[in-house]
Image (cartoon, grey):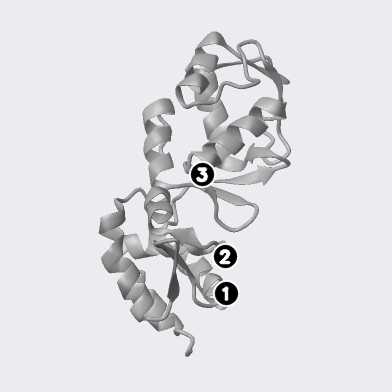
């Protein structure tokens, strides 16, 4: 099979939905149409036309397993070609980075800062304490097990000196949970970005614009 050239990919990425689809597949994953819909914040039926365009251009391959359509990039080299195109398409996007097992970088700092400002965390300078209000917020999004009001975590400043981000067990649990919800995704390790659904959720819950 001939490898699609960069110009072909660029033309396909002129539509933001196709850009989001390819970004979702860039980590070598094979995803169902429903998985891609959740990752991109679209309805499955709205993706079918765009998936067909990508398939016709031999950018993706679709396989059927157990009656479900699974999609993957046709060539691993396409992921490398996508990286500069994706970054050019979203130059102002706020990103985080993996800091151990929790979320650092600008996105991690922004989430922590918003939680402090809204009274979900109390900041003592070196530690962050989950308040009753914060525990209720986490319970609202389904994160309850092992995380209770009064839980203390260190303020990590390894990725950015100030203001720092939520580390420790709570920081680890929060990152895993947000990725499990499909609100955050690994873009290019160790870069973490918010999905379309995650941007909406973070704006509604914490007032963060990413």
Q: Which mark is residue 159?
A: none
Distance (Cα) linking label 1 and label 2:
7 Å
Question: Circle 2: is it few (<14), some (14-19), or many (20+) Cα within 10 Å?
Answer: few
Q: Earlier in the sequence, mark 1 or mark 3?
A: 1
In the rendered image, residue 180, in percent from the top left (x then y), is placed at 53, 40
Please report the residue visible at 40 percent of the width from the left and 48 percent of the height from the top.
38
Distance (Cα) linking label 1 and label 3:
22 Å
In the rendered image, residue 120, in percent from the top left (x then y), is placed at 53, 17
In the rendered image, residue 27, in percent from the top left (x then y), is placed at 57, 61
Helix, strand, or loop for circle 1? helix
Q: Is residue 195 left or right of residue 189?
A: left
| 207 up-or-down from 194: above or below | above
Distance (Cα) linking label 2 and label 3:
17 Å
Please report the residue visible at 65 percent of the width from the left and 52 percent of the height from the top.
190
Is mark 1 in CB contact (under 8 Å) with mark 2?
yes
Q: Earlier in the sequence, mark 1 or mark 2?
A: 2
Q: Residue furthest front?
A: 66
Is mark 2 in CB contact (under 8 Å) with mark 3?
no
Residue under pointer 1: 76
Helix, strand, or loop for circle 2? loop
Q: Residue furthest bottom?
A: 2
Q: Earlier in the sequence, mark 2 or mark 3?
A: 2
Nearest-to-viewer mark from 2 and 3: 2
Question: Circle 3: is it few (<14), some (14-19), or many (20+) Cα within 10 Å?
Answer: many
| 23 up-or-down from 190: above or below | below
Q: Quadrant of the C terminus?
A: top left
Q: Which mark is residue 184?
A: 3
Residue 165 visible in this rendered orientation of the protein: no
Q: Is residue 207 left or right of residue 76?
A: left
Q: Which mark is residue 28?
A: 2
Helix, strand, or loop for circle 3? strand
């Amino acid at each position: 099979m001939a490898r699609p050239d960069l110009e072909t990919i660029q033309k396909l990425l002129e539509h933001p939905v196709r850009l989001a689809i390819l970004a979702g597949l860039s980590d070598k994953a094979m995803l169902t149409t429903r998985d891609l819909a959740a990752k991109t914040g679209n309805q499955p039926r709205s993706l079918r036309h765009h998936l067909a365009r990508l398939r016709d251009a031999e950018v993706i391959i679709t396989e059927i397993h157990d009656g479900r359509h699974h999609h993957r990039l046709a060539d691993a080299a396409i992921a490398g070609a996508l990286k500069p195109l994706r970054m050019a398409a979203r130059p102002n996007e706020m990103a985080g980075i993996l800091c151990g097992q929790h979320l650092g970088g600008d996105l991690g700092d922004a989430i922590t800062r918003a939680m402090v400002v809204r009274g979900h965390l109390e900041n003592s300078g070196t530690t962050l304490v989950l308040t009753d209000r914060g525990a209720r917020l986490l319970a609202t999004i389904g994160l309850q097990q092992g995380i209770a009001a009064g839980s203390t975590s260190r303020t990590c400043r390894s990725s950015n000196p100030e203001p720092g981000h939520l580390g420790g067990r709570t920081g680890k649990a929060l990152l895993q949970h947000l990725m499990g919800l499909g609100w955050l995704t690994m873009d290019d390790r160790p870069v973490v970005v918010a999905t379309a659904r995650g941007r909406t959720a973070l704006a509604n819950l914490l007032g963060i614009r990413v």
